[in-house]
Amino acid sequence: ENPYLCSDECDASNPDLAHPPKLMFDSEDEGLATYWQIFFPPPEPLLANITLSWNKSIELTDDIVITFEYGRPTIMMLEKSLDNGRTWHPYQYYADDCMEAFSMPARRVRDLSATSANRVLCTEEYSRWAGSKKEKNVRFEVRDRFAIFAGPELKNMDNLYTRLESAKGLKDFFTVTDLRMRLLRPALGGTYVQRENLYKYFYAVSNIEVTGRCKCNLHANLCTFREGSLQCECEHNTTGQDCGKCKKSFRSRSWRAGSYLPLPNGSPNACNSLLFLVPADCECYGHSNRCSYIDFLNVVTCVSCKHNTRGQHCQHCRLGFYRNSSAELDDENVCIECNCNQIGSVHDRCNETGYCECKEGATGPKCDDCLPNYYWRQGCFPNVCDDELLLCQNGGTCYQNQRCLCPAGFKGVLCQQSRCD
């Protein structure tokens, strides 16, 4: 008898033979494994999905471990969502032959580097069929990825926290709202699929372990289950499911997540009360002493920026001005007028070096000069004549590159026609 084909031990209508999903998360007595089990009636034999949803952002802190009974899948995928299941992204691929199953070379997490720690890979470590009835666990190795920065025994956590703050996308890589296991091919015992017995193949999962914490943006030490979902117990005058905004009366500056830096205590980046708003809280570099809170953007912005500045913190120059590279942001002379020539330039704006955008034929930083073969006359126009290529003929002379002065008896742009013709 093929041990990878199911017998008649599963019957959802019989409590003694049922294997419902809740058995993946129950406590198990020593020596007795309870498990969820699924068969494969048409039209999609061999395929099954298991989805875990928290309705809340979760930060993983240890390995994800899925325990299978009677053989691990030979092909499966782990997917993640960051928006409560609206969109899904690959998290890791598993196969006994990665190239055949997913057209990817097999890789191991411990071979990744600091620059590739958040790479999605395919592993063959958890899908081999040989002896797989004893090898039950499939892992998503969070600790091994942490170890890239913190060392094999995770003793250098300061370095890990620093990289989580500075490396783009690294913190989000360990954040999920949902996980989905896509089981694509069950354990086959090293044989080919017996098509005549498709309904007998099965998956059996006895345990799924996900270790993590609520994402509270470092503004809470406690997360509780309230109103049907996990909620951060927000501190630092923040609010929201993830402590992702300031309370209404504490919006003197824009909300910011707490930070691990500087080590060892980090920065709370607390929201400040509007009652104690002072110019320094506006963060306007001295170009304004007034701020306004924009509710739908959840930001505080400077009002009436002076010294030709603009922007949320008066950190940019107004249109028609450019940044003085030799001045600090809080200098009154930080912005210099472009002074583009109104006739020679396309508009009154310039780039960050003070150069204006010129019309055809115009040149120079302010567009107040003409290119070769052009002349200035309330703007730049192509030469009518010159002393090199556009020569006046029949004794004519070129006047300021604008026209030929023709002798008696000749006419035309270049005096090329006889008046008698």
Image: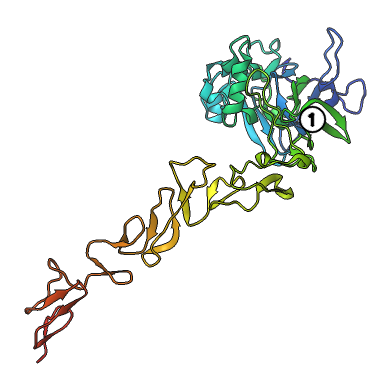
Instruction: Please tell me which residue is depicted at 65% across the width and 20% down the height of the picture.
Output: 142
Q: Residues within 10 Å of mark 1 (few under 14, many from 20)?
A: some
Residue 51 falls in image quadrant? top right
Kindly indicate the quadrant of the structure image that contains residue 37: top right
Where in the figure is residue 259, as x and y percent of width and height? 66, 27
Q: Residue furthest front?
A: 332
Colour convention? rainbow
The amino acid type found where label 1 is placed reads Glu
Q: Is residue 120 visible?
A: no
Q: In this view of the protein, which residue sits in the foreground, 307 or 96?
A: 307
Residue at which label 1 appears: 235
Q: What count of labels does the image hold? A: 1
Q: Is residue 315 visible?
A: yes
Q: Residue at x 57, y 17 (%)?
A: 149
Residue 345 percent coordinates (x, y): 39, 63
* Residue under the point 81% across and 19% down: 35
Q: Eyeballing the image, is 241 above or below 202?
A: below
Position of the C terminus by quadrant = bottom left
Find the residue positioned furthest to the left: 395
Residue in front for this viewpoint, 2 or 19: 19
Q: Quadrant of the N terminus?
A: top right
Q: Is residue 326 left or right of residue 141?
A: left
Residue 32, how many percent across, how many down?
Answer: 85, 10
Q: Which residue is situated farthest in the bottom direction here?
A: 420
The image shows residue 330, relative to residue 9, as above or below, that is: below
Q: Quick check: 216 left or right of 397?
A: right
